[in-house]
Image: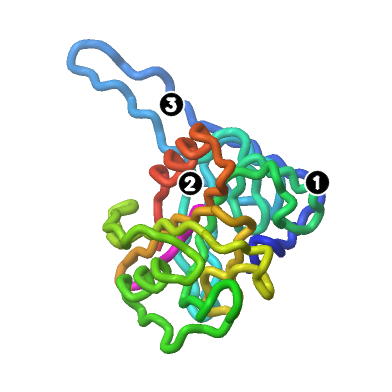
Amino acid sequence: MIMFARVAIAAAAVVAIGFAWVNFGPGQTGVGAQPTPTPTPSPQPLPDAGTLNPGRYWLNAVGAPNETPLPRIAVTLPAGWTAAGDLLLKNYAPDLNPGELDASDAGAGPSLVAWQMSGTFVDPCTDHTLVKPTPGPGIDALADALAHQPGTTAGPPTAVTVDGYSGKFVELTVTADITKCIDNFWIWASADGDSRWVQGTNEMNRIYVLDVNGRRFTFSARIPARTTAADRAELEAIIASIDIQP
């Protein structure tokens, strides 16, 4: 998994995947009959790159090479979302920045990624040494580490349930001037040696840390300062649609 700012897009051409609904016919409405429920559509594989048709897609988890297979999540997307590697992004035009997503992507809205986090850095802006010891396999230590990083403000870790799995989420906002950082502003590390760095001061990241059948599972929504109320509501609906396949 490459950093948000260095995501390689495997397909240069925009790929659109059609989405089909199965129609079992109109429900019966006579006496004693129940309407036929609308079937849940099967998720489609996420393409490497391209604008996505509205529908339901698999989003693979990345960042933990020693765990096979990793859980994955299914999400329902409206129009206007794009695949870029293992990221989902709103209002992103990969042809404007061929090959990578970076801070010059001024039009992009929120994004979602199932990144498996393992720790944080001594200072996200000036010292990219991993904090030792790294948090153990549980929920609380990692959530607390994410919520207490230099150059950020964050609310306390808050209890949450996603698809029946309990855990906590942290909303942290970058307050440091990232233009003065030595090599960008890094807000978490993953066990595969990768790291996530932000694209702008005042960017918010909502990070979910869940217990999925005894294994820690994390995903994150990036919410740039420019995100509109409509786009934020759309992101909330996508998160509410999540199904986790352990």
Determine which residue is flagged by label 3: 24
Name the element at disc 1.
helix
Q: Examine the residues drawn in magenta and state their main secondary structure.
A: strand
Residue 143: x and y in percent read: 36, 68
C-alpha separation, residue under disc 3 versus residue under disc 2: 23 Å
Determine which residue is flagged by label 2: 75
Q: Residue at x 40, y 70 (%)?
A: 148
Three-letter residue code for mark 2:
Val
C-alpha separation, residue under disc 2 versus residue under disc 1: 25 Å
Look at discs 3 and 2 and give the one toward the viewer.
2
Q: Which residues make up the magenta segment?
A: 215-221
Three-letter residue code for mark 3:
Phe
| Mark linked to residue 95 | 1
Extreme residue toward the top, this view:
30
Residue 185: x and y in percent read: 60, 68
Q: Is residue 232 left or right of residue 31?
A: right
Snapshot quadrant of residue 246: bottom left
